[in-house]
Structure formats: structure tokens, C-alpha cells
Amino acid sequence: MIIHTMKSILPGAKAERFFDFMVNAQQDIYANWLPDEHYEFHLINEGKNAPVGNFFYFDQSIGKKYRMKFHATIVIAEHPKKVVYQMRKFGITLPGFLELNFEETADGIVLTEQIRIGFGGIGRVFDPFIQIVYSKRFFVEMDSHHTREWQSLARCLS
């Protein structure tokens, strides 16, 4: 399994604002968040236990080389601390998760973003194929994207 963790300190930010945005997806804010890299993020269907079960579409660039288009379902939502999305592609639930944690501090929030891709147990035999797409170069670009995107969202939500 590939696990990649990134962290940002966002002075003045509020965990509740970040959480609410990430479970409700407002396209106008998303388009202004990183206009040259973020294209679409919208709610397709609301889950029966919303926000758990909410089904989204994401489309964004990660650097100049990578384009990420996928659907995702919220599988964990702990207001206002944590949101976990599980990716879907072509109607298939994938072994890919995006976890966002918002830790409130006296000065703002510490945002931790973790990407988990791959299988545990016997399914690990497929991980080398996953690493072809999600290479070290991808995660270098992802680190840079992470730094830009969360600082920018903090400005958009203030």
C-alpha cells in the first residue's frame, strides 16, 4: 500500500469552514481556489446518512504532468475534524482514499492530508502496478500542489 502524508499550518483558518466546504462542494469557490489547477468539484448525489455517502466528482491538475479526474464517496465524516473519500472510476470502487484532518489550534488549523492507495494483505501483489501511475514524481508534484492549494483555500474561505 502506498501512503503519502502532507501537512499544512493555516493561521486564522477554522476547521468547521474547511469541513463544511469539503462535504458540500461549492463549485464557484472551487473554481477560484486554484483557477489554473482546479476545474470541477461538485456533489452528484447526497448520501442517505449525509455527509457520509455523499458522491462527488473531482477534476484537477497536479503540476503540469498529472490530471486527476475521478468520482469519490465520503466514507467517514467526523464534524468538524475529519473527512475521508474513497475513489471510484468507471463505476468501480477503488482501493484509494483521500483523508483530510482539520486540527483546530488557538492560531488556526493544522491540516493533514493523507493519500492511501493500494491493497493490504494478499492484494499487495497489485501494488507495483499502482506505483507505475502513482510514482515518486507524482508525489513530489502532489507535495507542491498541497502547499499551494490549502493556503489558497484558507484565503477563499476567510
Image: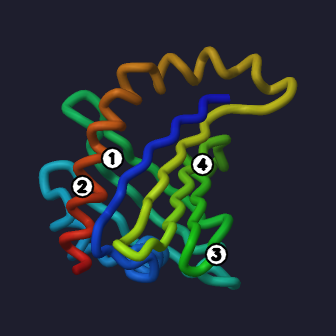
Judging by the rendered image, the residue that carries numbered circle 1 is 146
Judging by the rendered image, the residue that carries numbered circle 2 is 38
Placement of the C terminus among the 4 image quadrants: bottom left
Estimate the x, y position of residue 76 in percent, counting from the top left.
Answer: 67, 67
Which residue is nearer to you in this view: 152 or 60? Answer: 152
- For marks 1 and 4, give the CA distance: 16 Å
Q: Earlier in the sequence, mark 2 or mark 3?
A: 2
Which residue is nearer to you in this view: 36 or 3? Answer: 3
Placement of the N terminus among the 4 image quadrants: top right
Estimate the x, y position of residue 139 in percent, counting from the top left.
Answer: 40, 29
Q: Earlier in the sequence, mark 1 or mark 4?
A: 4
**Tag 2: residue type?**
His
The residue lying at 80 percent from left, 26 percent from top is 123
Whether residues under marks 3 and 4 lie with C-beta atoms below 8 angstroms apart, the answer is no
Q: Earlier in the sequence, mark 3 or mark 4?
A: 3
Residue 78 - label: 3
- Residue 1 in sight: yes
Which residue is nearer to you in this view: 107 or 77? Answer: 107
Residue 97 - label: 4
Whether residues under marks 2 and 1 lie with C-beta atoms below 8 angstroms apart, the answer is no
Query: Callout 3: helix, strand or loop?
Result: strand
Q: Tag 1: Cα neighbours inside 10 Å, few (<14), some, or many (≥20)?
A: some
**Tag 4: residue type?**
Phe
**Tag 3: residue type?**
Glu
Whether residues under marks 2 and 4 lie with C-beta atoms below 8 angstroms apart, the answer is no
